[in-house]
């Protein structure tokens, strides 16, 4: 992996160019968020917003604990609503729908 790191890095940047770069302007709406995102999260938020405008689709892929939910919430505020209002499969009212083996 180390022997080919430069080649792999160049290939990734060629095939998946950044939608938002560090020196690109940031939306003033970022400042109104209740939690201030880290710089990398801000870039991800802006890139996701740009992708959504282009294709009405987007994806945030990162390790656990990196702030994916914070990254998606400014672009898709209804996503947070869906998460908070989606019933758990263990709720008593849904026990009839869960198949037990």
Image (cartoon, grey):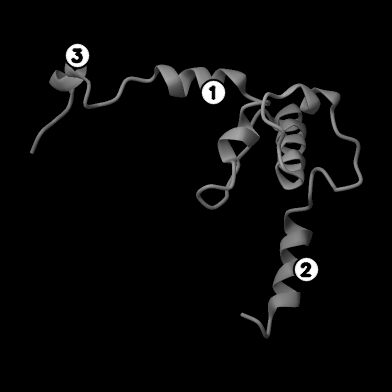
Left or right: 60 in relation to 47: left
Q: For marks 1 and 2, give the one nearer the viewer.
A: 1
Q: Which is nearer the N-term, disc 1 or disc 3?
A: 1
Q: For marks 2 and 3, give the one nearer the viewer.
A: 3
Label 3: element kind: helix
Res 93 label: 3
Left or right: 58 in relation to 95: right
CB under 8 Å between discs 1 and 3: no
- Place of residue 14 in the rendered image (x, y in percent of width and height, measured from the top left): 78, 60
- Place of residue 54 in the rendered image (x, y in percent of width and height, measured from the top left): 76, 31
Above/below status of 93 relative to 44:
above
Residue depicted at 45% across the width and 24% down the height: 83
Above/below status of 94 relative to 54:
above
Asked where in the image residue 3 lies, by quadrant, the reply is bottom right
Q: Crowdedness of circle 2 by 10 Å Cα count: few (<14), some, many (20+)?
A: few
Label 2: element kind: helix
- Place of residue 62 in the rendered image (x, y in percent of width and height, measured from the top left): 57, 50
Q: Which is nearer the N-term, disc 1 or disc 2?
A: 2
Residue depicted at 17% across the width and 27% down the height: 98
| Residue positioned most to the top | 93
Name the residue carrying label 1.
79
Res 7 label: none
What is the spatial separation of the Cα atoms under label 1 and label 2, in whole angstroms?
34 Å
Res 10 label: 2
């Amino acid at each position: 992996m180390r022997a080919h790191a430069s080649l792999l890095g160049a290939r990734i940047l060629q095939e998946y160019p950044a939608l938002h770069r560090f020196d690109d302007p940031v939306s003033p709406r970022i400042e109104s968020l209740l939690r201030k995102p880290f710089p990398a999260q801000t870039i991800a938020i802006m890139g996701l917003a740009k992708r959504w405008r282009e294709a009405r689709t987007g994806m945030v892929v990162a390790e656990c604990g990196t702030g994916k939910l914070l990254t998606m919430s400014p672009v898709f505020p209804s996503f947070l609503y869906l998460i908070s209002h989606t019933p758990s499969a263990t709720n008593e009212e849904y026990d009839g729908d869960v198949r037990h083996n």
